[in-house]
Amino acid sequence: MRPVLKLIRPAHWIKNLFLLIPTFFAGSIFQVERLEIIILGIIAFSLIASAVYILNDLKDVEVDRIHPLKKDRPLASGAVSRSTATVLLVIFTASGLLLSYLLNPVFLILLSIYLVLNIAYSFGLKNIPIVDLFIVSLGFLIRIHSGGILSGVEVSHWLSIMVLLLSLFLVLAKRRDDLVLQATSHSVIRKTSSSYNLEFINACLTIFAAVIVVSYIMYTVSAEVIAHFNSSYLFTTTVFVIAGIMRYLQITMVEQNSGSPTSILVKDKFILITILLWIISFYIIIYN
């Protein structure tokens, strides 16, 4: 079972917690009925996400075998056969789509769009510079809008913008790690690597880091948001956003270890504490 678990990447399911964000910001995270539906939605999204991981590994098995890190993946190493992976792909796809249909037809449409986008990504779009970054980022936008559909909460333009910016920032950091690996291993990590260099990635990271912070500040001090939450103290949470962005830049540019955003968000103590303090401060403002 260990190779199969490694193939479906359950650790990456943490990304699907983005479905909870609209409910949290709406101040209704403790409404049990909504929470139950969203949890089922997270399960459906996780099934489809794992199907996408399997598809991508099937498509890139030969390339992964020469990657310094990906060569140990189950398909690349031979721990899981192609036939087994194909069966799992069909099961996970069918289960995820069926569950999403039972939950909400609109959610099924959004999840289907996510699936189609990722199929297109695996079969060619990931080889188109800049487009590859936006395809990955759109996945996070689909997640928060899926959470909004399931919970009956309207997703604001502020939330959409910040999630898009943050996801682009994380994807760029991951691409930077690819460039560093490529330089040290002297092998082609991904086809789009030749279209990027460290100067370009560093410039983009700096731009997005600045825009994220400015956007968040504008969000916290906007009259619309202050009226919605009935609090003028939202700006105090900015310190945690700035600290988190700075730490991620440090991990990316100084430690040069941004290859796995999921791993960083789960294992880096500074990032974890920053996120926890941000959640607590926002919780106090929204729910008290």
Image: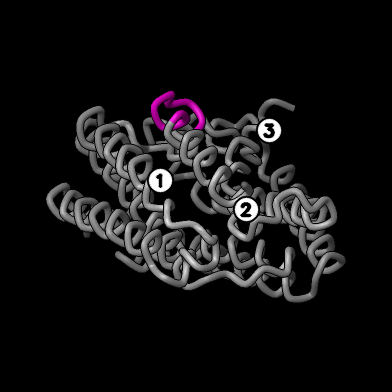
Question: Counting residues from the N terminus, which is met first, the one under dot 1 or under dot 3?
Answer: 3
**Residue linked to disc 2:** 24
Tell me whether the residue at label 2 lies in contact with that at label 1, contact meaning CB atoms closer than 8 angstroms. Answer: no
Measured along the vertical axis of the image, is residue 252 above or below residue 190? above
Report which residue position mark 1 lands on. Answer: 237
> Residue 115: image x %, image y %?
62, 65
Which image quadrant is residue 109 in? bottom right
Which sits earlier in the primary sequence, circle 3 or circle 2? 3
Mark 3: which amino acid? Leu
Which numbered disc flags the more N-terminal residue, 2 or 1? 2
Q: Nearer the viewer, mark 3 or mark 2?
A: 2
Q: Which residue is mark 3?
A: 5
Q: Who's the residue at 43% across and 52% down the image?
A: 234
| Residue 255 is covered by the magenta coloring | no
Q: Where are the magenta residues, as a range?
A: 266-273
Q: Which mark is residue 98?
A: none
